[in-house]
Image (cartoon, rainbow, N blue to C red):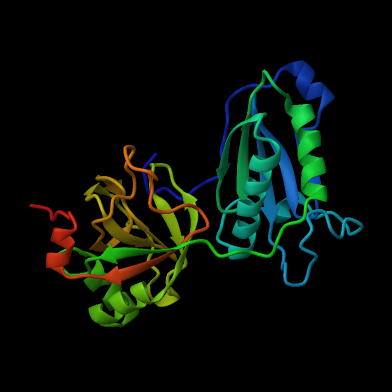
Amino acid sequence: MAIDDQPKRPVYNSPLTPEFNCEMNTSTQINEHIRLDIAGENVLILYFTELDFTEHDLTLGANEDKKEPSSNNILQSGISETVNSQVQQTVVLLRQHLANEIIDLIPSYASVLVMFDLLKTDHHQLRLKLQQLLKSCTIAPEQQGRLIELPAYYSLESGMDLPRIAKQAKLSVEQVIHLHQAQEYRVYAIGFAPGFAYLGEVDERIAMSRLATPRLTVPKGAIAIADRQTAVYPAQSPGGWNIIGLCPTDMFNAKAEPIMPVAVGDRVKFVAITKQQFLSLGGKLAD
């Protein structure tokens, strides 16, 4: 799978036992905006619906007397700051209350993958605990994540797709650069490669479809756009996003603390730098 593939609903091939399938449903509606599915032998997944929390009680499980939404209303992908905020706050709750049973939590745009220890719990026990927790715990009003500034060397030398984006948008290259660095972007998810952070949303005027044919090599640090998302490639790899600049910051370093400069829920702002500043910060240009 290419590094820049759009996050999709996880698919797991671990078979459930016949006895387990007979005794339990594989899907549970926890409340009007959270559904729980069995996704593998020791994996559950929570899906979140789009709700306007400015008009609803912020307590998980509120308005339970209303009709449950159909599964078609569950967001399985897409970009929603409201939903993603609920995802992140739910992750905090699960880490606080279920740390002993949980091996890992993997948040995405509108879901949380829950991997648990089969020696300490099972699907049935954990599902009951999740139901109780998510119906009784109050979610606090959203708190904005950290604001992280990432240096960006924008130029025709470092951003090979800038002229094409400018032409399609009927803007100058300078205007494209201005629009990209004018936004604050939310970190919605960390992608299929360590440090590949999906950031949204770019100004709709400079949104660009992925390349029809991905490039075999995209340089480390490439700042790129795909649809209304932007990202920094953490390592050299194939990729089909539109390149507009280079960032000298390491997006993943296993020896550093923290290993990534951004986390899901943080905000990112790109700050333009010169070529000399880029090189002095450790950036490298292709030969």
Could one spot residue 161 in this view of the protein?
yes
Identify which residue, 216 or 112, lies in the foreground: 112
Where does the image place residue 112, in percent across and percent down from the top left?
A: 62, 44
Q: Residue at x 76, y 62 (%)?
A: 58
Q: Point out the image quarter for the N terminus.
A: top left
Q: Is residue 167 above or below residue 117?
A: below
Identify which residue, 276 or 37, lies in the foreground: 276
Q: Is residue 274 left or right of residue 145?
A: left
Residue at the extreme left:
287
Q: Is residue 116 left or right of residue 266?
A: right
Residue at the extreme right:
65
Q: How many marks?
A: 0
Identify which residue, 150 or 5, lies in the foreground: 150
Where does the image place residue 156, in percent across and percent down from the top left?
A: 16, 69
Where does the image place residue 259, in percent across and percent down from the top left?
A: 37, 43
Where does the image place residue 251, in percent across and percent down from the top left?
A: 33, 50
Q: Is residue 3 above or below residue 11?
A: below
Determine the image quadrant of residue 18. Answer: top right
Q: Is residue 67 left or right of residue 269?
A: right
